Amino acid sequence: MSASPLHLAVALDGAGWHPAAWREPDARPLDLLTAQYWLDLVQEAERGLLDLVTIEDGLAIQSADAYRPDERTDQVRGRLDAVLIASRVAPLTERIGLVPTAVVTHTEPFHLSKAIATLDYVSTGRAGVQVRVSLKEHEARLFGRRSFPPLTPSDPSAAALIEEGFAEAADYVEVLRRLWDSWEDDAEIRDVATGRFVDREKLHYIDFEGRHFSVRGPSITPRPPQGQPVVAALAHQAVPFEVVGSSADLGFVTPRDAAHAAEILAEIRCAQTAAGREEETLHVLGDVVVFLDEDDATARDRKARLDDLAGEELRSDATVFTGTPAGLADLIAEWQQAGLSGARLRPAALPHDLTAITRGLVPELQARGLFRTAYEADTLRGLLGLPRPANRYAVA
């Protein structure tokens, strides 16, 4: 085993990250909206000893266009709520971390705090949340409480909107964390003899006043088993890098190569130091879309066939890897040498690429002494080597 443990996550989304994956012979398009489908995927990831799975979610129907709805009928459309999926599979899994995605722009932190706290209880300490910002005009219209102009990356007003959106996300995370701490660990007494169920002095108003939220608290859910469930975020550029550095426990990034990974990590570490968190553990994983097969040619041919079915070559914000488990292990090892804590793998087609990860990549990494051969902790924070944080409101 390497001195710094390698961390592996899998990002689950529909039938896979390739838009034509639902048409593969082993795909299960009829099962996408069933609990059993998601349970099967998460249990397979757990058999591979992975640290965690993330479950994708959004506010609007999926679209091939990054900025507006499309009218396509040849790709997967429609999804279940990620937090509810995680809560459903939690009692039927044992060790793997469960990190659903939640869009924080149009939702309330009070509601999400108790949902993730509940997930932490249901999973006995394996919950996290991936916070996502939504600045799209058509998604704002679904709620009707605010509006955004139609934007493209070249729009000069995009930078200011992005900065404001991620500042709101940072406030949102701060409210989550304070609400999770609003009950001290021993606030519940449950003493039948004295008739005292709770010590009211150990419930605290959080009295958060910021630019975006005014939340008094306390939560209605006692402090989660982990104290603080793991907060994760995906970041592609400077402003999100700052949010990861200042607010998250786990960041997902999209490097082109090892040198780019080192550059990204330097920016995040700088933001972490500026936020006074340099002593805290903050893991950063590199995202990669994977087509895994026994030989390179088969992986390339499979991707080409899926591209033909989709009518265009796969486009992704992340590196697209086509090849063998050994080749992917080389890439992950390079990224780890550059300073990343590991990788979050996006299976191009499910279940094919997930089983190739758990039954091909994981044994390859184990043979190199880079990855665990058994789970070594019962909580997600434990798997990631994150201490259980003290309650900010408790009197020493």
Image: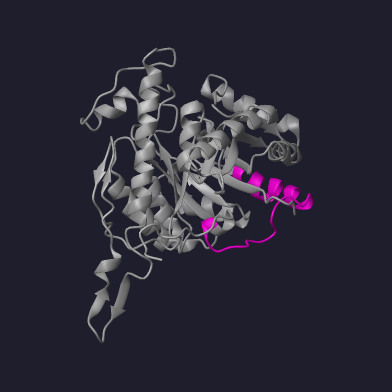
> Which residue is situated farthest in the right direction here?
368
Residue 276 covered by magenta stretch: no
Numbered label tally: 0
Q: Where is residue 232 in the image (x, y as percent from the top left)?
A: 48, 43
> Which residue is situated farthest in the bottom direction here?
193
Quadrant location of the C terminus in the rendered image: bottom left
Extent of the magenta region: 353-381
Instruction: State left or right for residue 199 relative to residue 81.
Output: left
Is 184 in front, or is 9?
184
Q: In which quarter of the image is residue 247?
A: top left
Residue 268 visible in the current orientation:
yes
Q: Where is residue 116 in the image (x, y as percent from the top left)?
A: 38, 53
> Which residue is situated farthest in the front direction here?
396
Q: Which residue is drawn at 57% across and 31% down?
A: 267
Residue 358 covered by magenta stretch: yes
Q: Position of residue 192 (x, y in %)?
A: 26, 84
Quadrant location of the N terminus in the rendered image: bottom right
Above or below, 143 against 109 in this view is: above
Q: Where is residue 305 in the image (x, y as percent from the top left)?
A: 61, 26
Q: Residue at x 62, y 61 (%)?
A: 375
Residue 348 visible in the current orientation:
no
Is 268 in front, or is 2?
268
Q: Which colour scheme is used?
A: one colour
Above or below, 177 against 102 in this view is: below
